[in-house]
Amino acid sequence: MLAQRNGQARAALPSLQAYGPRTTAPLSLAQRRLWVVEQFAAPSGAYGMPLALRLEGELSVPLLEASLAQLIKRHDVLRTAYVADDDGDPLAVVSADVSLPLALLDLSALSPGEQEARVAEAIEHNARQPISLLQAPLLRGQVVRLGPQRHVLLFCMHHIISDGWSMSVLSNEVVEVYARLKAGIMQPLPALPLQYSDYAQWQQALEQAGVMREQATYWQRALAGHDGLLQLPADQLRKPQASHAGRDLHFSLPAALHEQLKGLSRTAGVTLYSTLLAAFQVMLHRLSGSHDVLVGADVAGRSQPQLEGLIGFFINVLPLRSRWQEQLSVREYLAQVQDTALSAFEYQELPFDQIVEAAATPRHKGANPLVQVLFVMNNLPVRHASMDAVRVEALPMGGGYSKFDMALFIDQEADQLHGTWQYASDLFQQERIELCVKGWMTILEQMVSDPDKRLREINMPITTAAIVAAPATPAAPAAPNKADKLGKFLKKSQSPTARPAVAVMRESLMVPGQAFPLLWEPTDPGLDLIQWIEHNRPLVEQKLGEHAGILFRGFALHDIHAFEAFAEAVQPGLYGQYGDLPKKEGGKNTYRSTPYPEKKMILFHNESAHQDRWPRKQLFFCEQPSPIGGATPVVDCRLMYQKLPSELRERFESKGLLYVRTFADKLDVSWQHFFKTEQRAQVEARCAAAGIQWTWLDNDELQIRTPCPAIITHPVTGQKSFFNQVQLHHIYCLDPDVRDDLLALFGEQRMPRHVYYGDGSPIEDEVMQQIGDLYEECAVRFDWRKGDVILLDNMLAAHARDPFEGPRKIVVAMGEMIERSALAALPDTQQRTLEKDEAGA
């Protein structure tokens, strides 16, 4: 295990100890979880670990049984059953002597074609048959005879005593012991230094030493803010309870591509694993439309060398987080992916179910908690061996199960990579998975062809229509409910699921030839828009990133309640603590539009761009259009950035902005109202935390100076955007008579609001005129209709309000709050100015 990354001190791990023979033993943390799951699950083979070996050569079944007997004696876990004690808690009972007779299925009299069919049936039956936890061994075996020197050996172990690595240990040791017995060597293999129960005891020591608590803290930080669900477009709706029915799609990567990938990995300084994982994550970002993706990674769970030769349930799943940054190059993203993985692997002792608890993400009905997609690159200890004169070959397994929505397994063999794309057949059809394979391989090809390519330039050969034609249903959040006897081990989930709406959306551009904004209208007037949004949220995210704004027109949104439900579907968890707008009566997390004189225009701005946090998404709902005027003009801020003269654009990028606000008595809201406190110390603490300078003035007045960017790089799309509120703050934009009166009263240094370049120098009036002209040149206006909703990416689009006459009701909702600290650092010139000001204070 890697140690001391990022300079963080790690708690020392207790040493592993052998406790000797036992009749009862503790369960590991993973075993306890799986034992509880089995108490509630219907009998099935979902937790079986099947193995099929083709044997070519003269086989002695008695010697094979003797070999298995040695293994059962060697590994205590193969002689262990799992029962409930008098209190209903799980108990591991270790028997001294357990036998495993091998059933024999003789197919030697059948034709080769019939044999092939019957072997396939036997393999499937072996994988599907449940294994009882109550009777050791939790292992079964069968020999299928095809001819005198042709056999197939079938094994299946319960997952509670096994994992993929353990299956390799089992097959390797069977081969080795059989060869020894055939050679007349009766002496057993050397005794194991530890047993699985010693590992379970060691886990208890980890808990007592505070290691698990430390690791839980890491995972809580690493997963903070994630909603725990990756919504992929699918072909069937998610069922309230997953059946785990699955299928496998096998494929291989060309040898030439394999070599190119190894070369890219070497030059980028990363492992091949990281390169393959990075391409997989890029694909998931594109398919889901999400900029925050979790992928599960299998780890062997054998961080201590003494554990490598044991059979048991060691494997763990670690959620690896990828945040989409389109401006990164392939090389930069590869380094980021590897760094994330290495950090996670340092905290691999905490079992997955405790990682889920630490993350405290919402549970979703019918979906695995936290991780729905898995990526595995196998490094199992498989040795190419023979049992004396018997050649051994592992057969591919297709057990008909998938514990995840989808999982990609990669096996490296000589100069080729073989893949198995396992998928939940309740959700996906094979054609869709074939498209995923094609998309992943195409991403790999683009990565090796140009490692300096930006992520936003990577293309996928899957059209949006093909991917979203049959949308995936997001699982309903589940409410926890304790089971009576086993509640301390397992939480059950119960929640109703809504019946989805199925319809087609008509799409067009509001301005011909201009991407901003997009117009969506229903082809069916009875379309349930809210359910459509819930089922197509990845598409909405994708289109919003492309077009910056979407106008929804012609839907059955008749009142504030329908709008708020729609807004919540677009962005679960609307922001409800916005102090700059009055709350909408009858709404929970919605607001009335800005109370501003009807005959005055509210100039263009990005919501809260002058604050330390702002909403990424903003929705405007027309409850009542005004009879005259009252449009909400919108501007694509990417276009504004492009149209700014290059010299001015560079000036704004290098200097940034400095917003100055003076809270003067009776002229603006008081600082007490703005900061929601009467305590100066609390105000100072908040300002210091946000990087805001403050000065206390006479008459209990306050002036704050807030450094902000004028131009940002969008955190999802990677595009540059003119993101600010210069028009709302610069005194040039005031009516001339109002400006003159205020300057006469207060002087420029104590104006209620003003904005400067980030170095404190004035923004010239001619620059403000130029900006105003550009806003109008880029503005898109449309007449509101009752029931209209426009969804804006506030970081890509600015809005304003035209003067109006008569009644007008526009309702506002917002969500996905972004911290200014999450953006790139302030320009150097602006930072130096702030440091100089602070030094002189």
Image (cartoon, rainbow, N blue to C red):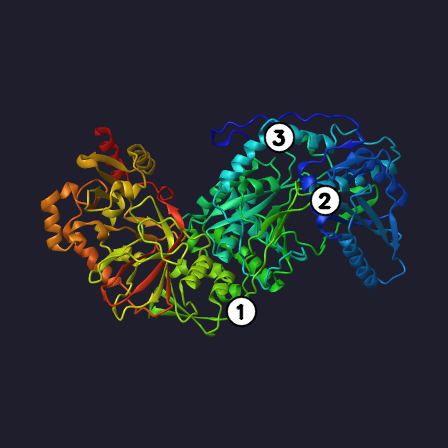
- Residues at marks 1 and 2, CA–CA distance in whole angstroms: 40 Å
Upstream in sequence: badge 3 or badge 2: 2
* In contact (CB < 8 Å): disc 3 and disc 2: no
Residue placed under numbered mark 3 in the picture: 207
Pick whichever, 450 or 687, lies toward us: 687
Q: Quadrant of the C terminus?
A: top left
**73 on left or right of 42:** right
Q: Amino acid at mark 3?
A: Glu
Q: Position of residue 341 (x, y in %)?
A: 53, 40
Q: Residues within 10 Å of mark 2 (few under 14, many from 20)?
A: many
Q: Position of residue 799 (x, y in %)?
A: 29, 58
Secondary element under disc 2, as helix, strand or loop, is helix
Q: Position of residue 225 (x, y in %)?
A: 47, 45
* In contact (CB < 8 Å): disc 1 and disc 2: no
Image height check: is 406 above or below 177?
Answer: below
Q: Position of residue 773 (x, y in %)?
A: 20, 60
Rendered image quadrant of residue 584 = bottom left
Upstream in sequence: badge 1 or badge 2: 2
Q: Residues within 10 Å of mark 1 (few under 14, many from 20)?
A: few
Q: Amino acid at mark 2?
A: His
Pick whichever, 60 or 464, lies toward us: 464
| Count of numbered badges drawn on the protein | 3
**402 on left or right of 468:** right
Image height check: is 468 above or below 666?
Answer: below
Residue placed under numbered mark 2 in the picture: 159
Upstream in sequence: badge 1 or badge 3: 3
Q: Quadrant of the N terminus?
A: top right
Pick whichever, 493 or 5, lies toward us: 493
Residue 1 appears in view: no
Residue placed under numbered mark 1 in the picture: 502
